[in-house]
Amino acid sequence: MLAIFPLITLLLLFFILYQPKQDWRRSYLSAVIILGSLIALSTELLSLINSINYPIIISFWIITNLVLAGFYYRRVSKKQQLFPLFSFPKITKLSGLILAGIMIIIVLVGIVSPENYSAKLMDKSPYNQFNYCALIAIRSSKDEPIEEMQVNKQLFIENWSSSSVKLLLPKN
């Protein structure tokens, strides 16, 4: 269900950006670029405030779609063309086959959604007895520096560092 909101956003962006005098592909590419930027920006902003959870993400997409629907309504109320006319160029059979293959792969990955089996095994024996030999911490200069870290009741202390990368080894 969550996947429908970005698709609605993509359609709204496309209809907002479409101009009858230009090729429809230009509007589509612009909409895809804006959608990708929206996804990246929202992910970064929500992770900054530790709010990547289902209700917040749904709220973000609903608000985004409402704002875009408002822009679209404003454009439609000015008596501009409601649905653009498409003129698809002729594509070769090979191009169509490649495009169909890519679409099938995308749909299958979306349906299958592979699970993270290693995360499920972390609490089970013998995996829960795994001893880490080292940890690598990558932090920006704005983040609080790491001098030690505890993982699975094992303390790791800084052994080597550069500007943003630190190597932590187990404390003996």
Image (cartoon, rainbow, N blue to C red):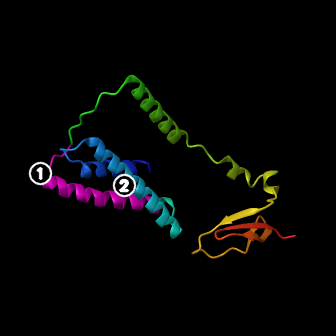
Q: Nearer the viewer, mark 1 or mark 2?
A: 2
Foreground pick, 102 / 22: 22
Badge 2 is on which residue?
Answer: 34
Amino acid on which the number 2 mark rests in the picture = Ile
91 left or right, relative to 57: left
Q: The magenta stretch spans which residues?
A: 55-83
Mark 1–mark 2 distance (CA, rounded to whole Å): 25 Å
Foreground pick, 26 / 59: 26
Amino acid on which the number 1 mark rests in the picture = Lys
The secondary element bearing badge 1 is classed as loop
Compared with residue 150, is residue 102 higher up or lower down, i.e. above or below?
A: above
Foreground pick, 29 / 44: 29
For this orientation, the residue located farthest to the top is 93
Question: Is 85 covered by the magenta stretch?
Answer: no
Q: Which mark is residue 129?
A: none
Compared with residue 83, is residue 157 higher up or lower down, i.e. above or below?
A: below
Compared with residue 37, is residue 163 higher up or lower down, i.e. above or below?
A: below
Badge 1 is on which residue?
Answer: 79
Question: Is 68 covered by the magenta stretch?
Answer: yes
The secondary element bearing badge 2 is classed as helix
Circle 1 residues within 10 Å: few <14, some 14–19, many ≥20: few
Evaluate whether residue 13 shows in this view: yes
Sequence-first tag of 1 and 2: 2
Residue 102, horizontal then vertical, whole percent: 47, 34
